[in-house]
Image (tube, helix red, strand yellow):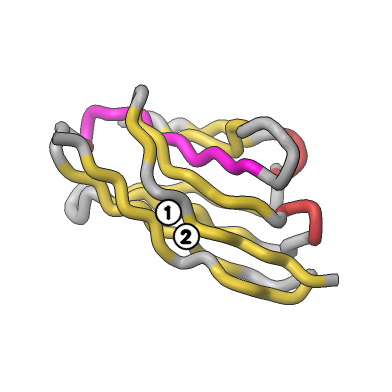
Amino acid sequence: QVQLVESGGGLVQAGGSLRLSCAASGFIFSISTMRWYRQAPGKQRELVAYVSSGGSTMYVDSVKDRFIISRDNAKNTVYLQMNSLKPEDTAVYYCNYYTNWGQGTQVTVSS
């Protein structure tokens, strides 16, 4: 079955960086579009970025030029490099493949 395991969250000061990882299994990772979502307290879950099987990427406007999504097909892993973090980036970040979700990793940015 599909498994998605996120890691790399934590507490960081504004302006800092974190790199999230999502280790995937149970499907053919190399041909799959992978997505990162986030959900802040009291808000709806929102799409942050995706990377297609061919390497095309998309970002929500609020993270453009700060976040970078990438993938390593040899490791079945998708990454989210988050730079210049802001307090409004505080959320639980989730890895997604179709209707499958990881358990989430908490990112907290202090001002």
Q: Residue 46: where, in percent of width, then height?
A: 63, 32
Identity of the residue drawn at 57% across and 68% down: 18
Residue farthest toward the right in the current orientation of the protein:
111
Q: Is residue 12 left or right of residue 104?
A: right
Q: Secondary structure at mark 2?
A: strand
What residue is drawn where x is 42% and y is 54%? 79
In the image, residue 94 sits, relative to residue 5, either above or below, namely above
Q: Position of residue 12 (x, y in %)?
A: 68, 74
Residue to which mark 2 is pinned: 20
Q: Residues within 10 Å of mark 2 (few under 14, many from 20)?
A: many
Report the Cα–Cα distance between label 2 and label 1.
5 Å
Q: Position of residue 82 (x, y in %)?
A: 61, 59
Residue 36: within the magenta?
yes
Q: Are marks 2 and 1 in contact (CB under 8 Å)?
A: yes
In the image, is residue 1 part of the stretch drawn in magenta?
no
Nearest the viewer among 44 and 49 is 44
Q: Which residue is depicted at the point 38% across and 55% down?
A: 6
Seen from the viewer's position, the closer of residues 51 and 39 is: 39
The residue under label 2 is which amino acid type?
A: Leu
Viewer-proximal residue among 102 and 36: 102
| Quarter of the figure with residue 53 | top left
Task: Identify the residue at image location x=40%, y=35%.
Answer: 96
Q: Which label sits on residue 40?
A: none
Quadrant where the C terminus lies?
bottom right
Is residue 54 in view? no
Identify the residue position indicated by label 1 in the image: 79
Where are the magenta residues, as a range?
Answer: 30-39
Tell whether 47 sits left or right of 52: right
Q: Give the main secondary structure, helix, strand or loop, of the magenta stretch.
A: strand
Residue type at tag 1: Tyr
